[in-house]
Image (cartoon, rainbow, N blue to C red):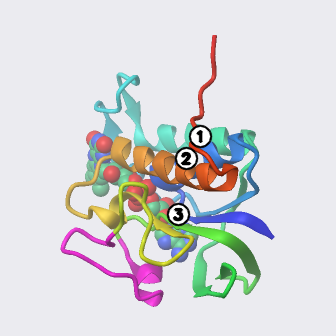
Amino acid sequence: MSTIVVIGDGPAGLSAALFLAKNGMTVTLFGKNETALHYARLFNYLGIPEITGPEFARVAREQAVKFGAMLVERKVTQVEKEAEGFICTDEDGTTYNSRYLILAEGKGLKLARALNLVETDAGVKVDRDGRTEVEGLYAIGRMTRRTRSQAIISAGEGAAAALDILSREAGKDVNDFDSL
Ligand SMILES: Cc1cc2nc3c(=O)[nH]c(=O)nc-3n(C[C@H](O)[C@H](O)[C@H](O)COP(=O)(O)OP(=O)(O)OC[C@H]3O[C@@H](n4cnc5c(N)ncnc54)[C@H](O)[C@@H]3O)c2cc1C
């Protein structure tokens, strides 16, 4: 069983998976590299003067996997809430149990709607850490801000959700700092 399943491999899901895996969590990340970034050329990602979206996605996928995220290049077709967590089913019919579930679906809200998550005009309703009203269930990135979407914001929301889970697991506030 994974502690955390992340559905969606755009900057939001990749960032969450990176932070969680880097800090020792068992993370399964789903996505077929179909992020909206494949249409983008980034000049506004702080710290990177210019990069194409596809190159950004390639580097970010490698980075998350290098730190231990298990990347499954399949779509998740079904999600269910259980008493103690979640069960996801992928397009091959394989099922995955997890304690936490992070949705990072991008523009679409298919799985969020299947879980009856509350929506506002902007998208799925979440708090600052990406928590939805369902215990253990997070929504991050474009699906929470459908008309104000930027890659760096999605990545930041992935980081915030990851730190929230790491803090809950540790029983105290956690940062992910590395020093010179
Ligand atoms: C033409 C264009 C130009 C852009 N230019 C810029 C720019 O210059 N600068 C900038 O900051 N932003 C730009 N953007 C926006 C940027 O691409 C988005 O803000 C960013 O990709 C959102 O990241 P995300 O992770 O929230 O969602 P996405 O990048 O959309 O990622 C969601 C991922 O989840 C996957 N997914 C969804 N459902 C499932 C499922 N059930 N199972 C498995 N995987 C699933 C999708 O296939 C996708 O890979 C541009 C967008 C477009 C379309």
Q: CA distance from mark 2 to mark 3?
A: 18 Å
Going from N to C along the chain, the mark reached first, 2 or 3, is 3
Q: Position of residue 167 (x, y in %)?
A: 60, 49
Going from N to C along the chain, the mark reached first, 1 or 3, is 3
Question: Looking at the image, how many numbered discs can be counted on the residues?
Answer: 3
Q: Secondary structure at mark 3?
A: loop
User: In terms of depth relative to the viewer, which is nearer, 31 or 165?
Assistant: 165
Residue appearing at x 61%, y 46% in the figure: 172
Going from N to C along the chain, the mark reached first, 2 or 1, is 2
Q: Is residue 118 magenta?
A: yes
Which is in the foreground here, disc 1 or disc 3?
1
Magenta span of residues:
108-125
Q: Secondary structure at mark 1?
A: loop
Q: Quadrant of the C terminus?
A: top right
Q: Which residue is mark 3?
A: 8
Quarter-of-image position of residue 128:
bottom left
- The answer to whether mark 2 and mark 1 are in CB contact below 8 A is yes
Residue appearing at x 60%, y 77% in the figure: 76
Label 2 environment density (alpha carbons within 10 Å; few <14, some 14–19, many ≥20):
many
Looking at the image, is 45 positioned above or below residue 75?
Answer: above
Amino acid type at circle 3 is Gly
Looking at the image, is 106 positioned above or below residue 50?
Answer: below
Q: Quadrant of the N terminus?
A: bottom right
Question: Which label belongs to residue 163?
Answer: 2
Question: Which label belongs to residue 174?
Answer: 1
Label 3 environment density (alpha carbons within 10 Å; few <14, some 14–19, many ≥20):
many
Cβ of mark 3 under 8 A from ligand 1: yes
User: In terms of depth relative to the viewer, which is nearer, 161 or 36?
Assistant: 161
Amino acid type at circle 2 is Leu
Q: Quadrant of ligand 1?
A: bottom left
